[in-house]
Image: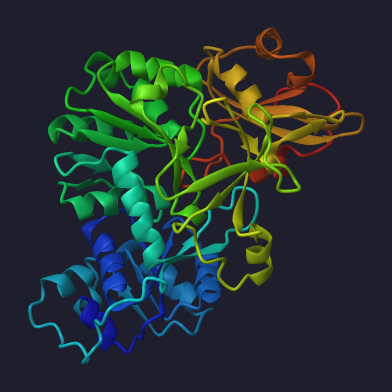
Amino acid sequence: MAARLLAHGLRRGDRVVVLGRNSDAHLLAYLACCRAGLVSVPGNYRLNRDEIARLLRHSGARAAFADPLLGARLAAAAQDAPEVEWLGTLHGGADPRVDVLAWAADRSAPVPRAGAFGDVDPGALAQLLYTSGTTAAPKGAMMSHGALLHEYASCVEALDLDAADVPLHALPLYHSAQLHVFLMPYLALGATNHLVADADASSLNERIARDGITSLFAPPTVWIDLAEHPRFRDEPPRALAKAYYGAAAMPQAVLEDLTGLLPAVGFYNIFGQSEAGPLTTVLGPADHARKPLSVGTAVRHVEVRVVDEHMRDVAPGEHGEVVYRSPQLCSGYWDAPEATAAAFTDGWFHSGDLVRTDAEGYLYVVDRIKDVINTGGVLVASREVEEALHRHPAVCEAAVIGTPHPRWLEAITAVVVLREPTSEDELIAHARAHLAPFKVPKAVHVVDAIPRNPSGKPLKRELRERFGGVASAVGFTA
């Protein structure tokens, strides 16, 4: 297949956008790009025409693949990006000349040009990995072959991955953790991998039982759905041995419920960000009971510091920004020299995460720096308020933001999804029983669903846009 890509006139370093749901064709497209020295650009298949066009233009893509159902949307977007020379389908397309699965099965593939598959420079780009964009517009992290290989080695060691494992991959492959923390390292080990298109609790339960799945990674939202599914509670999966979670904070109440349901399963809290491959720290099974709120310690190829605004190390227990130095890090942001310079200072990558460490060096995430709320001049971590709300039995999900307030600068505002009706007074009283008075939400909004990115992280910028009016009184908004 790599030869077919090169036969279409593509050259090393050209960008190729891949839009699709989980499938063997999606994986083949990524591997073929790596083999041919092309730069893959994974994209969310939920993007609309304008968003796809921006991705094509910003990445400078020369080619694009999409699932058949997305073909029309991609073709329309390509009209606004004339530099894209041709379009292909990941599978089942009307044109077999550009059908990935047909290419892979075709033994009459064109002979590659002499030297076309020479050694790839470890510093050469393998992928433009667009960040989740929870606090700002997504940026294209430039991931080299060498960075990803270092990251894969870190994953195998820190996550106890083994060729005998039977992993199920339920998140989309444009999700950096699913592709680079689990699928690619497991492929390198020779494990038997299972791909599913959707992380639906019912279908996951069926696949876990039917295929003897021993290893599963999912964000907290999916684990919440699994924990509440009757079959999961009545017949916990017997083969499951390793449970990985990350991409967003796991409510402690949910973790306690899961570990009670699955006492023989090893739980792993994984933490990091796209720019680092993305794995940076892990809390393994041995430490879960004594440090359930920690994200663990750094993996082998990542060096961690916690610093103040002047790049001075802070003492254990004090809040600071976690910064990284690692061969896993991206080479910068595509076509964004100012953002690159701002992120990399003094040889360290600035994560934007506010954390603390304990006396043993274990890391605890306080919040995203941009999500810390300044209420009356006092800084409050939104995550702490969310944890308190999650302990109310009626609260299924909670996201806490700061909204403009004429007196307090920012009002602590809670957005919740309920599993059963409850009153505003009950939620406020519950928060007051668990938090200092200045941390109690001044407004509560009930919604059907909290907007999230594909990683499961709440899109707080969208919540601020929706509920960012000046808060004058506590109240419900349906």
Question: Is residue 179 among the parts visible in the rendering?
Answer: no
Residue 371, x across and y down, in percent? 68, 39
Between 366 and 54, the residue placed more toward the observer is: 366
Q: Residue 348: image x %, image y %?
A: 60, 55
| Residue 114 screen position, x and y as percent | 21, 92
Residue 376 relative to residue 53: left or right: right
Near-viewer residue (249 or 445): 249
Relative to 405, 253 lies left or right: left
Question: What is the residue that sits farthest to the bottom in this orientation?
Answer: 114
Pick the residue in front: 301 or 337. 301
Residue at position x 65%, y 23% in the image:
385
Residue 301 versus residue 160 in the image, above or below: below
Q: Quadrant of the rendered structure where residue 449 is?
A: top right
Total residue callouts: 0
Pinpoint residue 419: horizontal percent, then vertical percent: 50, 19
Residue 451's place in the image compared with 448, above or below, is below
Quadrant, the C terminus: top right
Judge whether residue 262 can be spotted in this image. Answer: yes
**Image height of 283 relative to 279, above or below:** above
Residue 341 image-quadrant placement? bottom right
Q: Which residue lies furthest to the right in this view?
A: 407
Taking the spot 16% from the left edge, 87% from the top edge, the residue there is 110
Instruction: Please name the residue shown 24% across and 70% down the image.
Output: 93
Q: Please tell me which residue is depicted at 70% across the width and 34% down the height of the picture.
A: 401
Q: How is the image coloured?
A: rainbow
**Is 346 on the left-hand or right-hand side of 104?**
right
Instruction: Pick the quarter of the image with the N terminus.
Output: bottom left
